């Protein structure tokens, strides 16, 4: 497994590189945003670890450019930024996870393992209202029209459709979709739900993703 670490602090880069290599990972390092982006585009990596505040190009912009170019490599932000708005911005840019500095190396390792865990093949399809989600092809359709979703938007929709007809509580959503198992502001869910509804063009007549105030959300026809 090869990891690209984009980190401009030499001490942190050395510490993480040594620890990851001791765990059996091959690690390439870049110390600026443009260099990291170039390396990520030049070869295939299994995972990207990206600092947010980088010289030349922020980690956020690196993530956005990779996702805009169709690169789906799992990406984890390493950052001292800790507001809800920062977390939302990182996830909306296409990050798969977000770990705040300072962090325990063991926690980082576990988050890496989660992202590298093999996804079993599936032929499952789920529908609600005019929406159809195909797990195997990772596609979503409104009628016959394909709708482009981010990885996290897709995961959120899949979770709701797998539990169609059942109210999904906010804490369960944040644990299962975001893999966050501690007290956390769940306001990020609302941002993603709003984005989903807009992308799926759900009107009042065909609304099928319902808000249960103070509780969570439910998918139902």
Image: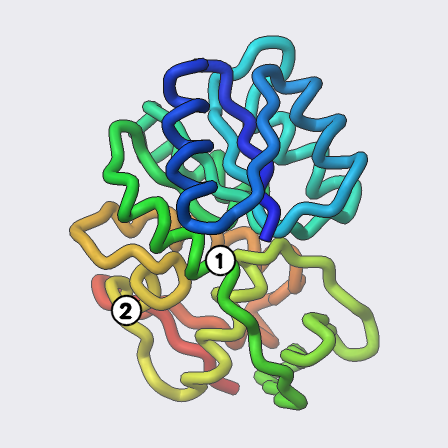
109 w.r.t. 49: above or below: below
Report the side of 119 relative to 101 (left or right).
right
Identify which residue, 105 or 129, lies in the foreground.
105
- Of label 2 and label 1, which has the lower sequence position? 1
**Residue 140 seen in the current view:** no
CA separation in Å, label 2 and label 1: 19 Å
The residue that disc 2 covers is 172
Res. 175 image quadrant: bottom left
Please give the label number shown on residue 97. Answer: none
Identify which residue, 111 or 177, lies in the foreground.
111
Please give the label number shown on residue 115. Answer: 1
> From this viewpoint, which residue is outermost toward the top?
55
Q: Secondary structure at mark 2?
A: helix
65 w.r.t. 195: above or below: above
Residue 145 lies, in percent from the top left, at 82, 70
Q: Could you classify mark 2 by the number of other residues whose Cα lies within 10 Å: few (under 14), some (14-19), or many (20 or more)? A: some
């Amino acid at each position: 497994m090869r990891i690209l670490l984009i980190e401009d602090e030499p001490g942190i880069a050395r510490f993480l590189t040594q620890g990851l290599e001791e765990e059996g990972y091959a690690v390439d390092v870049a110390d600026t945003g443009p260099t990291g982006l170039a390396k990520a585009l030049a070869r295939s990596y299994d995972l990207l670890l990206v600092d947010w505040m980088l010289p030349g190009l922020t980690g956020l912009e690196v993530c956005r450019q990779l996702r805009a170019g169709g690169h789906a490599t799992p990406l984890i932000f390493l950052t001292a930024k800790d507001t809800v708005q920062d977390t939302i911005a990182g996830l909306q840019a296409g990050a798969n996870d977000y770990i705040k500095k300072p962090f325990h190396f063991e926690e980082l390792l576990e988050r890496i393992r989660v992202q590298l865990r093999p996804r079993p093949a599936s032929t499952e399809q789920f529908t609600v209202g005019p929406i159809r989600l195909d797990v195997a092809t990772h596609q979503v359709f409104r009628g016959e029209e394909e709708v482009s979703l981010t990885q996290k938007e897709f995961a959120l929709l899949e979770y709701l459709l797998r539990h169609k007809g059942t109210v999904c509580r906010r804490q369960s959503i944040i644990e299962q979709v975001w893999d966050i198992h501690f007290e956390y502001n769940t306001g990020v869910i609302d941002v993603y739900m709003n984005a989903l509804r807009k992308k799926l063009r759900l009107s009042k007549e065909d609304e099928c993703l319902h808000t249960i105030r103070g509780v969570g959300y439910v998918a139902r026809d």
